[in-house]
Image (cartoon, rainbow, N blue to C red):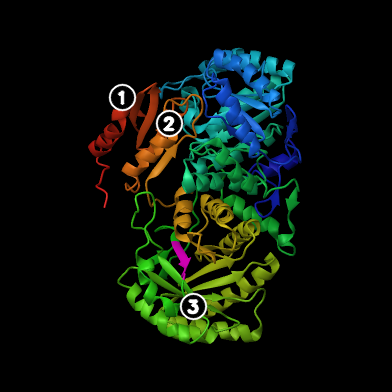
Amino acid sequence: MSDAVKNKLSWFAPSPLFYQRRIAREVRIGNKLVGGRHPILVQSMATTETMDTEATVAQCLRMAKVGCELLRITAPTPKHAANLKNIRAALNAAGCDLPIVADIHFMPEAAMEAALHVEKVRVNPGNFADTKRFAVAEYSDQDYREELERIEERFTPLVKRCKDLGRAMRVGTNHGSLSDRIMNRYGDSALGMVESALEFLRIARKNDYHDILLSMKSSNPKVMIQAYRLLVQRMDEEGMDYPLHLGVTEAGDGEDGRVKSAVGIATLLEDGIGDTVRVSLTEDPEFEMPVAYRLANRYPGNPSRSNLFEGVDKESLGKIWIQDHPITEYRPRESRPCAMGPFSIDRKTTVRVITAAPHKPSDWERNWRSYIDYRFGTGQNDIHPEAYLFSIKEAADLEGLAKFHAQAKPAQLAVVARFDLSEAWDLGAKASADMVALRLPQGSLSQPSSAKLSALCQAIAAKGQSLMLEFSQAPASLLFEAVDQAMAMLDTLKLKEVSLCLRGFDVSQLIHLNRALASKLLQEGRPYPIVLALDSEEEPEEVRISAATLFGSLLCDGLGDAILLESGRSDVDTVGLSYNILQASKVRVSKTEFISCPSCGRTLFDLQEVTARIKARTGHLTGVNIAIMGCIVNGPGEMADADFGYVGGAPGKINLYVGKECVDKGIAFDLADDKLVELIKSNGKWKEPA
């Protein structure tokens, strides 16, 4: 093992403080190349019955028209796999030469047939030659070796066929379909997912076959992120460089599905990981393409962007981050509390939501209902921002601010008043608010600015208000000069009720600067809470991606005590988006969690229709997790974290689960919704909608 690999084993990338794309082995899939410095490709999957050639071809052509670059089609049996030949021929006749990926579960015979007709075969190591019945068994080392020999015997013929025919292969691990053998040895873990794939990789390498991609999919973005990072680390350890396909499986629909996908996929793309992507939505596959392109196009083939930390000891800060963030462990950053009205900003309570007030302080009264009547989620849950931030520009704003603050207290809303240190800073001492936010100039503070800041902080402390210091996005050397000056002043004044915030527009830079700031504060023993903030004037779809990338990436690494999303656009719901990102990042639950698959030729009912129906009936059950699965491929496993599962068991029949246990089987389709509600009630999770 090389020294470079040894030094990197505690992490998975050259540094946590700058972007550098992982340069993977180049793999050909038909007329497409992935890996290397090639653009990140986007793909989707047909939802039609594979034996219906006409419908499948028509849908694939629609997918191609909106930019799909790899077409995945399920092949559950050898008969379905054989029909891929007809689909390939019909697509060619229509002028579409995009590669087809055959999706295989359970049947090696189907994979062998599919390899004759398509450019790539996807196999799931959890069910290609293994079983999943949630059985508990002890495997001795000898037992385990014998199982691996059996798998090698089953898998090697496909490896040789793909090698002989020049076909590519994806070894696609799903968190929800880890085999009992893997589960019993490694647990339901990211490590189990990685080991499941490595077993198959070693067999392929033994046969000198390398046209392989890998994926580590989960419906939980945190698990997915951990698994991919660990996979890269382990591949480095074993001298492997295979390209990676990214996706959050069973992501759902609407904004929920888009946000959850962006949290998982964009976090890894920011790590430099990923060569193809799929956004798995419970919608027609054509609607996945715009989201996938918005994600992929942010990361061109350029290998790195690393000049942000010139003049800063980035090696030391990077090591601190790595030591405090083990790959397979979620570890929230420790921070001291900072009061914000009736709330506290710190991870020991929960991640708070701050939003910029949509009106000037003088206009609050005529718009009061919009502040207190906000409803969020499918079930219109009573969730609202915990703090409204008003930017104070002139003395006239103070009177309206004071009246709003008086009304906000009984409504359990915090009020944050923002002042720019270079403009109306002197008004800060007169503000009626729970917290005062001070926007500092970029770079080191001049003597006059330092004097203003000190005077204002003393006045804030005397009134019992808390303080948020906002630093402008800048190269780290300039940023840290301002931070050092501010910290020295806070030490002198003995101020404790303080939080820090970096503000700016460049998402990638903000991710790395926030990591560096957290490392610096840890190094200096200053556990101030950190507010994650994004200013964006982008259109709604881009705001969604930017916010999910920034907030999701840092929250999934345990960094961030509150989030603040600002947009000047009236068509961007910053509050709902903020709560959706918190829920997708698994740090705060504010509504029902739905895990629903994107449909394919195996699906036994109309997933879009059923998902909408179940959401309408159960969307008010905050904190309840409900899985809606079209078939049993990933159903029982992917919904293992769910409270209840609604799974297609046979044509016209539904199976209901509580956790991993099937409690009612073969329910007639038209009775299944009512049976699900009865099941939720019998388990004490039901409440009547408001």
Please state which amino acid type lies under the numbered disc 3. Lys
- Element type where label 1 sits in the image: strand
Residue on which disc 1 sits: 668
Residue 355 highlighted magenta (yes or no): yes
Residue on which disc 3 sits: 494
The mark total stands at: 3
Question: Is residue 531 found left or right of 381 in the rendered image?
Answer: right
The answer to whether residue 474 shows anywhere in this view is yes
Please state which amino acid type lies under the numbered disc 2. Asp
- Element type where label 3 sits in the image: loop
Question: Is residue 365 found left or right of 232 in the rendered image?
Answer: left
Question: Is residue 475 found left or right of 655 in the rendered image?
Answer: right
How far, Cα to Cα, is label 3 from label 1?
68 Å
Residue on which disc 2 sits: 606
Of the pair 429 and 496, the residue shown nearer to us: 429
Mark positioned earlier in the residue sequence (3 or 1): 3
Mark positioned earlier in the residue sequence (2 or 3): 3
Residue 334 highlighted magenta (yes or no): no
Of the pair 284 and 618, the residue shown nearer to us: 284
Q: What stretch is highlighted in magenta?
A: 353-358
Question: Are circles 3 and 1 on residues that touch, CB within 8 Å?
Answer: no
The answer to whether residue 149 shows anywhere in this view is no
Question: Are circles 2 and 3 on residues that touch, CB within 8 Å?
Answer: no
How far, Cα to Cα, is label 1 from label 2?
15 Å
How far, Cα to Cα, is label 2 from label 3?
62 Å
Question: Is residue 230 found left or right of 621 in the rendered image?
Answer: right
The spot of residue 504 in percent (x, y) is 61, 65
Please state which amino acid type lies under the numbered disc 1. Ala
Q: Residue at x 65, y 69 (%)?
A: 479
The spot of residue 674 in percent (x, y) is 27, 34
Q: Residues within 10 Å of mark 3 (few under 14, many from 20)?
A: few
Q: In this view, does 363 lie above or below 668?
A: below
